[in-house]
Amino acid sequence: MIKIKNEIEIELMRQGGKILASVLFELSKKIKPGLTTKELDELAEELIYQNGALPAFKGFDGYPNALCTSVNNEIVHALPSSRKLKEGDIIGLDLGVLWPPEHCASCAMAGGCGGQKGLYTDAALTVAVGKISPEAKKLMEATRGALQAGLDKIKPGRKLFEVSAAIEKYAKGQGFAIVRELIGHGVGYDLHEEPEIPNFVSAYFKDITLKEGMTLAVEPMLSAGSYKIKKSKDGYGYETEDGSLSAHFEHTVTVTKGGYEILTKN
């Protein structure tokens, strides 16, 4: 069932989304050759706690970290490690935030949130490490553009597949493949809610009519080579089967009366 959010819930997601966007912005400024992905994860967690929120990914389906750090051919969900970034790499930073924090005895914030039920936001961006190749730059720009093309179709009364079709058309027009086994989703009271949001049109997925108050995580993932993927050796991440570069951009948005609002922005 798709969960429609009221004005109070959307405002809480707006607050959480602003925290999330600010953390991603700070992380992106730190990207440089020699930095480890583990250092990025540690900074992400520290910044989230400093803002009074909780890292949404940590513990979700057993994921042990706050941040997903996917480098080059890694698409999403790659574990942070001692791996050092190199000049010319591109890195996907995927992050979730829970705000307000849950009232939970195991949480450092326990007692400080008044028991308010938390809501999730989810966002991602791909960042260049120093000077990158023209192909990598074009891939990143195309993925960001595909996300915007999809968002521009969001409006009450329109079909979700109009969003999917716009992403697919833009990506293919730029000459890149669309990762098909990983898709967007609803978000809010759960990190993954209905509806499923593919980045391409397929009868396999249920089409729905967009309604005011829906909250959606739209996230195209493009490949410079094949759309086929495989599981990473870390057991959590996914990477392109042919080793080609991949990029990922994501925003949490809400459907408004006149269109949409990005909730994960500064």
Image (cartoon, rainbow, N blue to C red):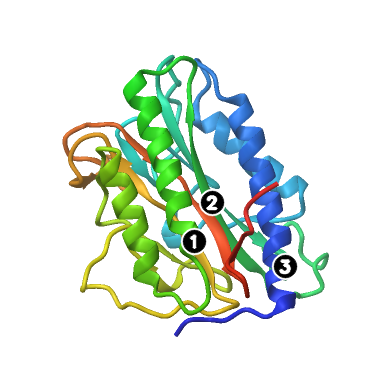
- Are circles 1 and 2 on residues that touch, CB within 8 Å? yes
Please say if the residues under marks 3 and 1 sit with CB atoms less than 8 Å apart. no
What amino acid is labelled 3 in the image? Leu
**Residue under pointer 2:** 123
Residue type, numbered disc 1? Ala
Residue 92, relative to residue 236: is it above or below? above
Q: Left of 6 or right of it: where is 174?
A: left
Q: Answer whether labels 3 and 2 touch (C-beta < 8 Å).
A: no
The label on residue 12 is 3
Q: 110 or 212: which is nearer to us?
A: 212
Which residue position is annotated with label 1? 217
Element marked by disc 2: strand
Q: CA distance from mark 3 to mark 2?
A: 16 Å
Location of the N terminus by quadrant is bottom left
| Earlier-in-chain disc, 1 versus 2 | 2
Neighbor class of circle 1 (other Cα within 10 Å; few <14, some 14-19, many 20+) is: many
- Disc 2 residue crowd, few under 14, some 14–19, many 20+, Cα 10 Å: many
Count neighbours of disc 3 (C-alpha within 10 A) and say few if under 14, some if 14 to 19, many if 20 or more.
Answer: many
Q: CA distance from mark 3 to mark 1?
A: 16 Å
Mark sitting earlier along the chain (3/1) = 3
The one of 32 and 35 positioned closer to us in this rendering: 32
Gap in angstroms between the C-alphas marked 1 and 2? 7 Å
